[in-house]
Image (cartoon, rainbow, N blue to C red):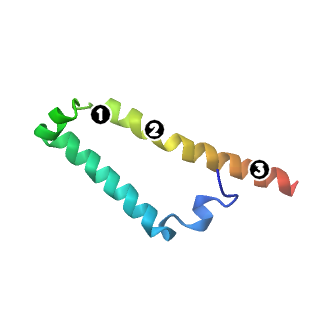
Amino acid sequence: CRSNNSLFTVGFAKNKTMLLAILTSFLLVVVILIVPILRDAFGLAMLNVTEILEIIGLTISPLIICEIVKFVTKYFKKN
């Protein structure tokens, strides 16, 4: 919640460096999970669909919470 501007008003694609970092991190994690030798080297197990969805939900929850806080703060500042 560093900024008072919503991610949706600023535009998600404005920060190309951040998008590249997110994409690179995601691809590295996927490669490590898919390649058996890397998965064993890191001591990881394959996740089922439910676990993957839980991780995605927990990962984006701070973004959703911050956007809600920004919306509520702007709404009450107007009134």
Q: Nearer the viewer, residue 55 or 18?
A: 18
Q: Earlier in the sequence, mark 1 or mark 3?
A: 1
- Tell me how far mark 1 sits from mark 3, CA to CA: 36 Å
Residue 73's disc number: 3
Q: Is residue 11 left or right of residue 27?
A: right
Quadrant hosting residue 36: top left
Q: Amino acid at mark 3?
A: Thr
Which residue is tagged 2? 57
Q: Secondary structure at mark 1?
A: helix
Q: Secondary structure at mark 3?
A: helix
Q: Amino acid at mark 1?
A: Val
Q: Are marks 1 and 3 in contact (CB under 8 Å)?
A: no
- Tell me how far mark 2 sits from mark 1, CA to CA: 12 Å
User: Outermost residue toward the front?
Assistant: 41
Task: Give coordinates of residue 78: x percent, y percent.
Answer: 85, 57
Query: How many discs mark residues in the rendered view?
Result: 3
Which residue is tagged 1? 49
Q: Earlier in the sequence, mark 2 or mark 3?
A: 2
Q: Amino acid at mark 2?
A: Gly
At horizontal 51% and vertical 63% (from top left) the residue drawn is 12
Q: Secondary structure at mark 2?
A: helix
Residue 9's disc number: none
At horizontal 40% and vertical 36% (from top left) the residue drawn is 55
- Residue 77 vertical placement versus 15 (above, below): above
At horizontal 39% and vertical 59% (from top left) the residue drawn is 21
Q: Are marks 2 and 1 in contact (CB under 8 Å)?
A: no
Q: Is residue 9 left or right of residue 23?
A: right
Task: Give coordinates of residue 63: x percent, y percent.
Answer: 55, 47
Q: Earlier in the sequence, mark 2 or mark 1?
A: 1
